[in-house]
Image (tube, rainbow, N blue to C red):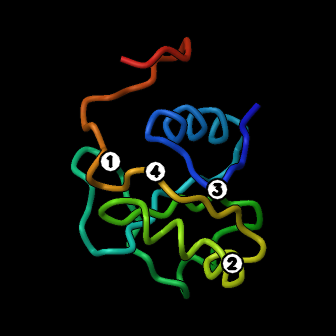
Amino acid sequence: MVGFRDEWTQEEYLRARKELEAEGRTVLLVDTIAREIEGAETTLYNPFELKKYPEGTVLVFYCDTGKETKERLKEFRERFPDKICISLRGGRGYWRKTLRVRDDGQSV
């Protein structure tokens, strides 16, 4: 069962994405700084486009450190009331491009 807290680590994000997408839910890693994360599929922050995703979509926002997106969660939640908004802990700076989650749930 996925928990929707204010922040997810990279590992929590990868596990939750796998589980939620298997249930048919959309999970997006949202770039708020126009700097992609190497090895990750990201979506550039564009409120107009993000509003088009279905209700219940999970938006995981990131910046360089995770601090700014965590501070802006209230703003994101007001802007996207029908979405689940979460901040990526540590942001882009803590992302390990080689971390993967296997089908059995173990990280490698």
Q: Nearer the viewer, mark 3 or mark 2?
A: 3
Instruction: Give the structural element (helix, strand or loop) at label 2.
Output: loop
Which amino acid type corresponds to the residue marked 4 in the rendered image? Answer: Arg
x%, y% of residue 13?
52, 41
Instruction: Give the structural element (helix, strand or loop) at label 1.
Output: loop
x%, y% of residue 34?
27, 74
Q: Seen in the image, is 46 located left or right of residue 90? A: right
Query: Would you name the residue on which mark 4 appears?
Result: 89
x%, y% of residue 42?
37, 59
Above or below, 6 relative to 24:
below
Residue extending furthest toward the bottom: 48
Between disc 1 and disc 2, whose residue precedes?
1
Q: Seen in the image, is 61 located left or right of residue 85? A: left
Q: CA distance from mark 1 to mark 2?
A: 23 Å
Say few, some or many: other residues with alpha carbon within 10 Å of mark 2 (under 14 / 14 to 19 / 20 or more).
some
Q: Are marks 1 and 2 in contact (CB under 8 Å)?
A: no
Q: Along the line of sight, which residue is nearer the eye, 90 or 30?
A: 90
Q: Along the line of sight, which residue is nearer the eye, 16 or 10?
A: 10
Query: Would you name the residue on which mark 1 appears?
Result: 40
Say few, some or many: other residues with alpha carbon within 10 Å of mark 3 (under 14 / 14 to 19 / 20 or more).
some
Q: CA distance from mark 1 to mark 3?
A: 21 Å
